[in-house]
Amino acid sequence: MKNKIHVLDGNSAAAEVIKLARVKVIAAYPITPISPTIEILSEMVDSGAMNARFIRVESEHTAISYIIGAQLTGVRATTATSSVGLALMHEVIGVASGCRLPIVMPIANRALVSPWSLWCDHQDSMAERDSGWIQFYAENVQEVVDLMIMAYNIAENSSVLLPVMVCFDGFLVSHSKQLVFLPEQKEVDAFLQEYKPKNLHLNTEKPLFINNLTSPEDFSEMRYQQEIAFENALRIIPQVQKKYFDQFERKYGLFEEYRTEDAKIIIICLGSMAGTVKYVVDKKRKEGLKVACIKITSFRPFPYLELTEKLNNIQTIGVIDRSAGLGAQLGSLALEIKSLININNQKFVNYIAGLGGRDITENTIENIFNDLKTSNIEPSKKWIDTSPNACKIRRIEVEK
Amino acid sequence: MNNNLISKSVNTCAGCGLEIVIRLALNILGEKTIIVIPPGCAALFSGYSNETTISVPGFQCNLGNTAAVAGGIRAGLDMQGIEDVYVLGFAGDGATVDIGLQSLSGMLERNDKVIYICYDNEAYMNTGIQDSGSTPGNAITRTTPGGKLIAKKDILRIVESHNIPYIASASVAYIKDLRNKIERAKTVQGTSYIHVHTPCPTGWGFQPSQTIEVAKKAVQTAIFELYEIIDGEKKTNKTINNILPEKEYLEIQKRFKREE
Ligand SMILES: Cc1ncc(C[n+]2csc(CCOP(=O)(O)OP(=O)(O)O)c2C)c(N)n1
Ligand code: SF4
Ligand SMILES: [Mg+2]
């Protein structure tokens, strides 16, 4: 069923799905660019459109703590955040995953300080990539809707039980109004079961002390259980995506391939920039170049096996990272990809682009394809959209 | 105590003041209680690995989010129409007056239906006796080797400014009074905050047998006042007619003695 068409931006799409998922407790703290999501939710609760408790708490640290408490009692609970808000949650982020709470949290990606930036890059969520949360990256508003709905189903699967961040680019998706199909309540009810705690539960009928000090004898095993949950997720995600396709006729995978059939040069990326890459791929194809795009939808778990197979026969691979990976050989996505390929036979370049709200334009992508065509270098990080006099700006001369 | 909701074998030091409070609190609140405990000496009751000492549901939160987690638990219960369960936050002074002050303030502002008990052993004991905002002036700790230069933070006045329905100070030396206060907290529609003075032999330097004596001296010297604020009305619970000289409290503890 195709559902009704709505005009929504990423923030309102996230709010609509939270409502459709019948979330019962929302605790949130305003931050650009995701504030509209929480404003919309507060309105939905206030008007009675949604049967939930909404609390504007005093910090993101409290927001995540509050919803962990709420979800442990047996209801869906959520928050939404960006940038420093996510960073402030860091201490508690791992409590949600360690307690195996299937919380779904939308993230509007925004750069981290310093310097201050209100605009998109991926450093905020990349900094949480090993925190035990599934991470999906949406390209556009439709994907926010679909990935959020699927996220509840995946997170709550008893062989997964992991929290999920659904990440979408700040402003580029969060504030971009697009035409989207939004399922009706009864369709979502058919797709998502009513929430029942499947593991840890604060219940006076069955007392359980949760999250106490754990000895080295058990700690590794409990981490290992999380690892296995991610392995299971690699299997469950496609199953849920198939079920979603059967019901809503929109197709998803762990990653999306665009014109990869006979491709020689490929760009791998995530988030909204994939739209621009695909557009340039079409253009280059018309010029006769065998180029393609792979967009990573599920960054955690990372679909390494399937990707290895796909990348086997590709001569030249460019990976775009929207976060700097400071001090590392490569950006976060590129590190994953490099470990899958044979750098002796395959050309591999990592491009850092689009930081702190810089647009990744058609031109940027063209430059990347041109560079990939010509460059013949060792795997390296290239700051493709940085001005040539980068080291000269805002320099303070210290007196000698 | 009739309903033993805490096992007998707990690794607190002999003469531990907070142990009296947690046992009494669960004894009064009963089985239909969910307890939230941050790291600190009270977490000895959370247990270790697959063993716990507490037979009501509980959660060990982070050091600074006791009030936030407790508030969230209440919200979750409310949304399921569960009204007959007490939510108890049980946190040390450091977890309350320092790192947890922001989340405490948020909960007090919202007036979440939570019973919050702060056991005040006047330092970060579990990490090896460092000073907290609740450590009194002149007290020696591992981070105030020359005696603390700053006076004790008056958390009760901070709490009072939030206008919650029930605030009390209490002491392990006055068990009946403490019992009455926890009983009253059970009836409160909103937040109740109880601040309990809980001497710590290990951190303060006195004999385990002196815990009650030390606590009592704090009240008798008027260093620690016992009172309640019920819907904004302050009521003194223990009027001391014959205030003892402060040194009678200070001199029985090593923490106020500088080595010559
Ligand atoms: C964010 C964070 N910082 C530091 C710690 C280390 N820590 C564990 S227990 C504790 C002391 C807590 O003191 P208090 O709340 O007064 O309880 P007490 O140990 O005195 O019972 C500290 C600092 C921690 N768990 N979390
Ligand atoms: S250090 Fe003090 S508060 Fe901690 S267990 Fe020992 S006596 Fe109790
Ligand atoms: Mg303490």
Image: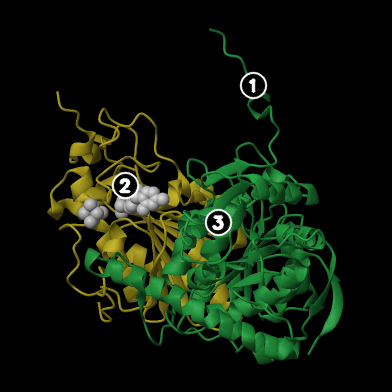
Q: Position of residue B19 (x, y in %)?
A: 25, 63
Q: Position of residue B14 (x, y in %)?
A: 15, 58
Instruction: Classify residue B54 as left or right of residue A302.
Output: left
> Label 3: chain?
A
Q: Quadrant of the N terminus of chain B?
A: bottom left
Q: CA distance from mark 3 to mark 1?
A: 31 Å
Q: Which chain is green?
A: A
Q: Earlier in the sequence, mark 3 or mark 1?
A: 3
* Circle 3 crowding by C-alpha within 10 Å: few under 14, some 14–19, many from 20: many
Q: Quick one: A229 or A113, which is closer to the camera?
A: A229
Residue type indicated by callout 2: Tyr
> Label 2: chain?
B
Q: Are marks 2 and 1 in contact (CB under 8 Å)?
A: no
Most distant residue in the top direction: A400
What hue does chain B carry in this figure? yellow
> Label 1: chain?
A
x 46%, y 73%: residue: A230
Q: Which residue has dot 1 on it?
A: A395
Q: Which residue has dot 3 on it?
A: A333
Residue type indicated by callout 1: Arg
Q: Quick one: B35 or A223, which is closer to the camera?
A: A223
Viewer-side label of 2, 3: 3
